[in-house]
Structures are given as C-alpha cells and as structure tokens.
Amino acid sequence: MENTVCLFVNKKEVKVEEGCTVEKLLEILGYSPRSSVWVNGNQLYLRDYSHTALKEQDQVKIIRILGGG
C-alpha cells in the first residue's frame, strides 16, 4: 500500500501520495497547470512545479488565473 500525506489546499484537507509534486496536485484537482501556487506562504515559479514535492501538513494556496477583457 502506498503512503499518503495529508496537506491543506485552500484550507481544505487533501490526501495525496507521498512524493506528490505541485504539478501532479494541480492535475489531480483539475486546476490549470498555469495556476498560481503558494506553499507555506511562499509563491512558487511555474518552472518549479514539476520538482517541488509536497510534505505532510503543507499549506497550499492555489489561485486560478482568469482571462478577460
């Protein structure tokens, strides 16, 4: 059985596989891969999403980028 970690995404508890990256989390939750993401209060660069692994009790904030005009 795979290990899971519990983290909080936009203040809601979410369980993911241990080693889950920000990129994978966005995919799992149905967010655009270009969404803005903060982990524990630090904004991440898009280039870091694929290799930033999430840890137990991380606080993640995801903001959808909306286009308009």
Image (cartoon, rainbow, N blue to C red):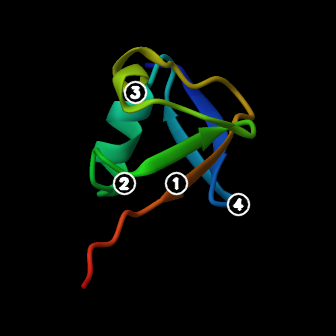
Mark 3 packing: few (<14 Cα in 10 Å), some, or many (20+)?
some
Give the residue at mark 4.
Answer: 11
Type of residue at label 4?
Lys
- Which circle's residue, 3 or 1, is located before the other in the chain? 3
Q: Secondary structure at mark 2?
A: helix
Type of residue at label 2?
Leu
Specify the quadrant of the image occupied by residue 42. top right
Circle 1/circle 2 CB separation < 8 Å: yes
Give the residue at mark 1.
Answer: 62
Q: Residue at x 40, y 14 (%)?
A: 51
- Dividing the image into 4 quarters, which one contains the C terminus? bottom left
Type of residue at label 1?
Ile
- Mark 4–mark 3 Cα distance, whole angstroms, equals 20 Å
- Mark 2–mark 3 Cα distance, whole angstroms, equals 14 Å
Q: From this view, report whether residue 22 is shown above or below residue 34.
A: above
Type of residue at label 3?
Tyr
- Which circle's residue, 4 or 3, is located before the other in the chain? 4
Count of number-bearing discs? 4
